[in-house]
Image (cartoon, rainbow, N blue to C red):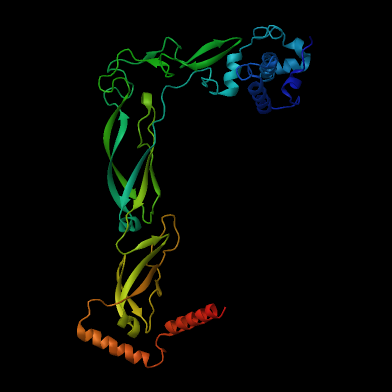
Amino acid sequence: MAKRDYYEVLGVDRGAGDGDIKKAYRRLAMKYHPDRNPDAKDADARFKEASEAYEVLADSEKRQAYDQFGHAGVEGRNGGMGAGFEGNFGDIFGDVFGDIFGGGQSRQGRSSAQRGADLRYLLDLDLEQAVAGDSVEIRIPVMSACDDCGGSGAAPGSTPSTCPECSGAGQVRIARGFFAVQQTCPRCGGVGKVIADPCRICRGGGRVEQQKTLRVEVPPGVDNDDRIRLSGEGEAGPNAGPAGDLYVQINVRDHAIFEREGSHLHCQVPISFTQAALGGELEVPTLDGKVKLRIPLETQTGKLFRLRGKGVRPVRGGAIGDLLCRVVVETPVRLSEPQVTLLKELQDSLASDGGQHSPKETTWFAAMRDFVERLTST
């Protein structure tokens, strides 16, 4: 039977680029792979056909010969293209699919050194520390490179040797029917090296757990969930690989007076009902010290006073926020008999003026009466 055109097999134009060819082959290989289609009668043949087309069109020299002479230009190349096609399928498959079907390393093997894991540390700060910045010393458990063997895992005076199973590639090729796939070497675990004489301190692991003391420079203005990255302060990598990073996550403790909202600070200021009625001045705290707050006559509870520039400068820049003080009128408690008498006299005096001293109360009771009348009249 005459062979189909390779471009037709992959469903690409003759001017298709390498990326398009690889994408088309990947789609067909996933569709017709025998392991994915055990019951499809033509899957094996379609899979071989697509693999044959890809091996030619993915190689610039073979593709040029095919474009010029057709199938005759590539017959007999690379292990016998055509009816007896086997090809170097393990290389093709690994190149296109990476580690999807086991393996995933290139034909040249891989470096045994691996980057260490990143670490996370939760740093609790007072509000004052977060706003002004600070230098804080922390202590963390971390896997560090073994000093005795320098992270190699081999006893001092010796070195790891090339794995005889995979010849240092970290991968072994396993034949599966008509094709082959690469898998991690079972002897060296993909490292490519074996240790005949392990280090007595780290037992061949190349790493030991240690307590590391670090100093964290906290910039001014940090807030909850902000992170500070300390490059290279994470765990040491296996096989003398580079260390990961340490991420210090900020947690600001609750404050006795202030609550933070972005660049602004909020606080409640209790005042007596005489201060609210007569007005006056009182001292309120800020993060810079005390300031005077003027309370006007007839101040109601919940009134908000804004002290500009007494908040926080955001860590990422911008204007300093404000301090928002909400006054709360406090009802006196534990009154003496003379004080109770005076308050009753004041109450009678205020009531004698027809409720003009409590406009909100008067308005509320009027609205309540109207509401009750409407209910009873229906």
Q: Position of residue 65 (x, y in %)?
A: 73, 15
Quadrant where the N terminus lies? top right
Q: Position of residue 66 (x, y in %)?
A: 74, 15
Q: In the figure, 115 relative to 368: above or below?
A: above
Please identify the quarter of the rendering in which residue 339 is found.
bottom left
Which residue is found at the position 55% from the left and 15% from the top?
181
Q: In the figure, 105 relative to 258: above or below?
A: above
Q: In the figure, 90 relative to 330: above or below?
A: above
Q: Is residue 360 left or right of residue 40?
A: left
Q: Is residue 176 left or right of residue 346?
A: right
Which residue is found at the position 66% from the left and 18% from the top?
59
Q: Position of residue 359 (x, y in %)?
A: 44, 85
Which residue is found at the position 49% from the left and 18% from the top?
109
Q: Position of residue 265 (x, y in %)?
A: 38, 64
Please identify the quarter of the rendering in which residue 4 is found.
top right
Q: Which sits in the foreground, 178 or 112?
A: 178
Quadrant where the C terminus lies? bottom right
Q: Is residue 242 left or right of residue 23?
A: left
Q: Which sits in the foreground, 274 or 306?
A: 274
Q: Is residue 227 left or right of residue 107?
A: left
Most distant residue in the right direction: 2
